[in-house]
């Protein structure tokens, strides 16, 4: 009898051990499934664009039966989505590794939008690197990031899937796109955060050709952020007529507020205001982004932006000092699975003639329509 009892006991013990091991393995597999170390994502986008009161094609400028120039299709002075007819955005491929303490992000872009986004580096050759950085979670409240990362200033970003409007604002277009350097992010508790950074000159993400450094900072509270950047964007020594000459390159200073509020469960109001100055030229502006979610798969949003140059900054394209522009963009956003369809109406109204109309006359306003398709995976 004792032998039988012991045998049963041993069998039960083996069975219990097997169950425990299986449960532990299953839990580990579930944890691995919940938080994969390698991640892969991205977007693909394309669009159609047409002007109501501007050129939609190139028109030659003829003098004395000779072509002396070309009137280009009319477009807003902001970045991206400015080509006529059916046009391409970009392919964005993002690979990342998230460890317990360290990780990396490799973000590649292909296509016209990507080329415009990474215009700063390298010199004379195409670039496909939008972001490339490593990070270290030093503690639960401190993270160090080293490499090339998109800017911390502004409401809008390069990715078309992350913006509500498909076309971009003037403030985003002429603020920084990306930085290369070292930044430290701090979780201060009670919804407060801070960031400090030492950086290359703005948008020089592969190399630093000037030997100068810029400095960035951010203070955040509950989704509201106050951002700063300061530093020279060039060298004091420049080659002029074959002679190395000392010039007075002023430091760029920019302060930027980005935030927003959930007014109701379906109505969100985003806010952006910025001021950039390099002593003799610069710009400032403000924009509101009211967005209403009308159903599970559709939302409508408006961007109202005022943007003014200090001096002849060149963003609006009037050639007149202290020009300004008021731009209203109405965008719908329909979601079909992983596909987003965005119809958009935009009106840019400048203080001076900045556009060419269909009669080849200078005009101070431009009305346009855009239809974009963005797939995210």
Image (tube, rainbow, N blue to C red):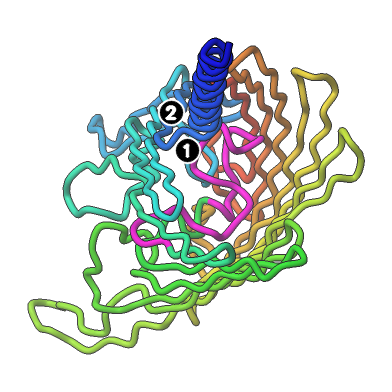
Q: Is residue 21 above or below residue 156?
A: above
Task: Decide: few, some or many residues near mark 1? Use Cα within 10 Å; few <14, some 14-19, many ≥20.
Answer: many
Q: Secondary structure at mark 2?
A: strand
Q: Is residue 346 magenta?
A: no
Q: Say which residue appears at 54% left-offset and 22% top-offset.
A: 13
Task: Decide: few, some or many residues near mark 2? Use Cα within 10 Å; few <14, some 14-19, many ≥20.
Answer: many
Tell me the magenta residue range: 145-172
**Left or right of residue 268, residue 333 in this image:** left
Measured Cα–Cα span from mark 1 to mark 2: 8 Å
* Residue 159 drawn at (x, y percent): 50, 38
Residue 191 appears in which quarter of the rendering? bottom right
Pointer 2 residue: 89
Q: Say which residue appears at 57% left-offset and 19% top-offset.
A: 9
| Nearer mark to the viewer, of 1 and 2 | 2
**Left or right of residue 266, residue 140 in this image:** left
**Residue 49 in sight from this viewpoint:** no
* Residue 311 drawn at (x, y percent): 53, 71
Q: Is residue 239 above or below residue 38?
A: below
Residue situated in front as seen by the camera: 82 or 157: 157
Q: Are marks 1 and 2 in contact (CB under 8 Å)?
A: yes
* Residue 231 drawn at (x, y percent): 42, 78
Q: Say which residue appears at 54% left-offset and 46% top-offset.
A: 157
């Amino acid at each position: 009898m004792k032998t039988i009892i012991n045998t049963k006991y041993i069998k039960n013990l083996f069975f219990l051990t097997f169950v425990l091991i299986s449960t532990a393995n299953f839990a580990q597999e579930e944890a691995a499934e919940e938080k994969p170390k390698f991640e892969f994502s991205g977007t693909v986008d394309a669009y159609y664009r047409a002007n109501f009161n501007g050129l939609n094609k190139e028109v030659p400028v003829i003098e004395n039966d000779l072509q002396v120039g070309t009137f280009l299709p009319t477009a807003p002075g902001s970045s991206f989505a400015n080509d006529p007819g059916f046009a391409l955005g970009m392919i964005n491929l993002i690979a990342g590794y998230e460890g317990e303490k360290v990780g990396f992000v490799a973000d590649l872009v292909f296509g016209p939008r990507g080329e415009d986004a990474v215009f700063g580096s390298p010199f004379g050759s195409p670039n496909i690197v939008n972001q490339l950085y490593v990070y270290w979670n030093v503690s639960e409240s401190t993270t160090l990031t080293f490499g090339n990362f998109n800017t911390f200033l502004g409401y809008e970003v390069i990715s078309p899937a992350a913006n509500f409007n498909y076309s971009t604002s003037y403030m985003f277009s002429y603020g920084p796109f990306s930085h290369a350097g070292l930044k430290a992010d701090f979780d201060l508790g009670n919804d407060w955060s801070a960031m400090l950074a030492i950086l290359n000159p703005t948008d020089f993400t592969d190399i630093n050709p000037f030997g100068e450094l810029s400095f960035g900072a951010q203070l955040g509270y509950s989704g509201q952020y106050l951002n700063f950047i300061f530093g020279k964007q060039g060298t004091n020594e420049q080659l002029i007529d074959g002679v190395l000459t000392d010039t007075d390159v002023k430091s760029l200073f920019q302060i930027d507020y980005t935030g927003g509020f959930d007014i109701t469960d379906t109505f969100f109001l985003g806010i952006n205001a910025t001021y950039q100055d390099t002593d003799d030229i610069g710009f400032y502006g403000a924009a509101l982004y009211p967005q209403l979610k009308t159903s599970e798969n559709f939302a409508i949003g408006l961007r109202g932006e005022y943007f003014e140059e200090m001096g002849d900054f060149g963003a609006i394209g009037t050639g007149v000092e202290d020009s300004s522009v008021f731009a209203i963009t109405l965008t719908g956003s329909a979601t079909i699975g992983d596909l987003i369809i965005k119809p958009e109406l935009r009106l840019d109204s400048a203080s001076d003639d900045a556009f060419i109309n269909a009669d080849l006359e200078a005009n101070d306003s431009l009305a346009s329509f855009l239809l974009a398709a963005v797939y995210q995976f």
